[in-house]
Image: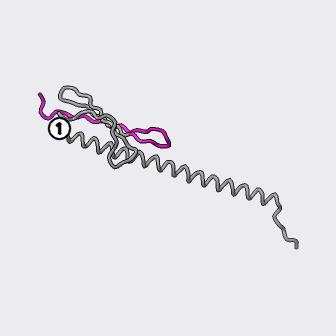
Amino acid sequence: MRKRAFTLLEILITTVLLVVGVMAVVKAITDATSIDSSVEGRAVALALAQEKIETVRNTAFGSIVSVARAPVTGFDGYVYEVTVTPAVDLKQIGVKVFWSFKGVEQHIDLSTLSTNPIPG
């Protein structure tokens, strides 16, 4: 009975398939890590925007004012902006939080309304 051995061509094909498979797995892991970083940045920005909205909503109606871009204390790379659009006994408040991901500026927008508890 004759033993069958692998040919050089079979070994080369197997090696190429393994390398392609490993490269695909490495690419998938790299993409997943990048997506995870993007989601983390968005989650932090959303939490900061919600916190700023709550801070503004707990401010006396007459003291609610717009704020130009300012860094978020304790969060390097995050900047916020508050815009206030007044109307009679009502203010529309918009909060934007900006950050950079892969060199591209990203932002989250939240808005709310605040009414004057003492109309007049």
Query: Which residue is located at x 47 percent, y 49 percent?
Result: 37
In the image, residue 106 lies in the stretch drawn in magenta:
yes
Query: Which residue is located at x 34 percent, y 42 percent?
Result: 71
Q: Quadrant for residue 93, please give it.
A: top left
Magenta part of the protein: which range?
A: 98-120
Residue 41 image point, x, y percent:
42, 46
Q: Note whether 15 is above or below 5 in the view shown.
A: above
Q: Could you tell me which quadrant the C terminus lies in?
A: top left
Q: Amino acid at mark 1?
A: Ala
Residue 111 image point, x, y percent:
30, 36
Query: Which residue is located at x 41 percent, y 42 percent?
Result: 99
Furthest toward the bottom, the residue is 1
53 to the left or right of 79: left
Residue 26 image point, x, y percent:
60, 54
The residue pinned by badge 1 equals: 60
Query: Which residue is located at x 83 percent, y 67 percent?
Result: 5
